[in-house]
Amino acid sequence: MNKLVKHISSKPFSPNTKKRKLSVLKQFVKWHNIIENTSSIILEDLTIKSGQKLPETLSIYQIESMIDFHDKETFISKRNKTIIDFMYSTSCRVSELCDVKISDIDFDEDYIQLTGKGSKQRIVPIGSKLKLNLLDYLNSKLLNDSSNNPFLFISKSNNRLERTAIFRLIKLTALNTFIDVNVHPHTLRHSSATHMLEAGCDLRTLQEYLGHSSVSTTQIYTKLTKEFLNEVFNESHPRA
């Protein structure tokens, strides 16, 4: 059994995955020792530090290629284009995207109200490019949605769009644009946050923009930005 523990420890799993596997193994050993009174298993006390895996990020070019992939003059194509643009431009979570209603958008003041974790609400600005896509999509929605569904993004059957549909959309679009990393909806949020920091956004402002309750959650992006700065320095500075 101890050999199995060492085998798990030697595998190229993430620290959190190793901890989960060892936890299951320890529960099994505990159960065995209760049932089998005659023979007990003693595991060596092995601890694995929990690591923080850095999120994948896409380049601005990759994001734009995903948005521009949906270029057909159809309701679904306009919807998909706007969804990807919305997620990247607002840095929203999937649940926040699904919950957005048309009434949450103020085109006069150019902002959107998002409802995040714990029903906490925040306001994010509407960028000029997103505004154009939103207006184009909403015009198409008016013609296609006979039910007048209050939610912003709806399915072909005029129902509120589900999280699974968003996951499928993002995955399929990434495949069709030949992006060779594991892309999921949260990748757009990570990428947006990273690009904002690289452009000079301060950490406290980014915390508010992402809807994080603690700035410590936002600090993971500073490591990504430091890596970016190191790469730029090594490639461009004469004394690198």
Image (spheres, rainbow, N blue to C red):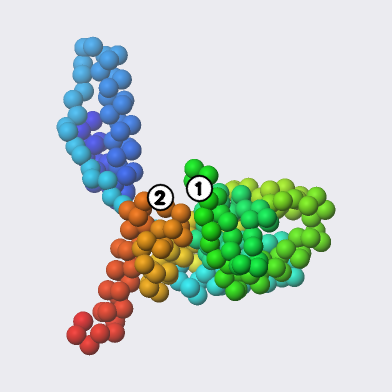
Residue 82's spot in the image, x, y percent?
63, 64
Q: Which quadrant of the figure has residue 234?
A: bottom left
- Amino acid on which disc 2 is placed: Ser
Name the element at disc 2: loop
The answer to whether marks 1 and 2 mark residues whose Cβ atoms lie closer than 8 Å is: yes
Count residues near mark 1 (Cα–Cα under 10 Å), then give few for <14, some for 14-19, many for 20+. Answer: few
Mark-to-mark CA distance, 1 and 2: 9 Å
In the figure, is residue 240 to the left or right of 207?
left
In the figure, is residue 201 to the left or right of 48?
right
Q: Which residue is mark 1?
A: 120
Q: Residue at x 27, y 22 (%)?
A: 30
Name the element at disc 1: loop
User: Residue placed farthest to the top in the image?
Assistant: 37
Q: Earlier in the sequence, mark 1 or mark 2?
A: 1
Q: Is 133 rendered above or below residue 122?
A: below
Of 46 and 111, the residue lying toward us = 111
Can residue 56 be seen in this snapshot? no
Look at the image and tell me in which quarter the C terminus lies: bottom left
Q: Which mark is residue 213?
A: 2
Q: Residue at x 36, y 63 (%)?
A: 203
Q: Is 194 rendered above or below residue 235?
A: above
In the figure, is residue 208 to the left or right of 154?
left
- Amino acid on which disc 1 is placed: Lys
Q: Residue at x 55, y 72 (%)?
A: 64
Can residue 219 be seen in this snapshot? yes
Residue 96's spot in the image, x, y percent?
56, 51
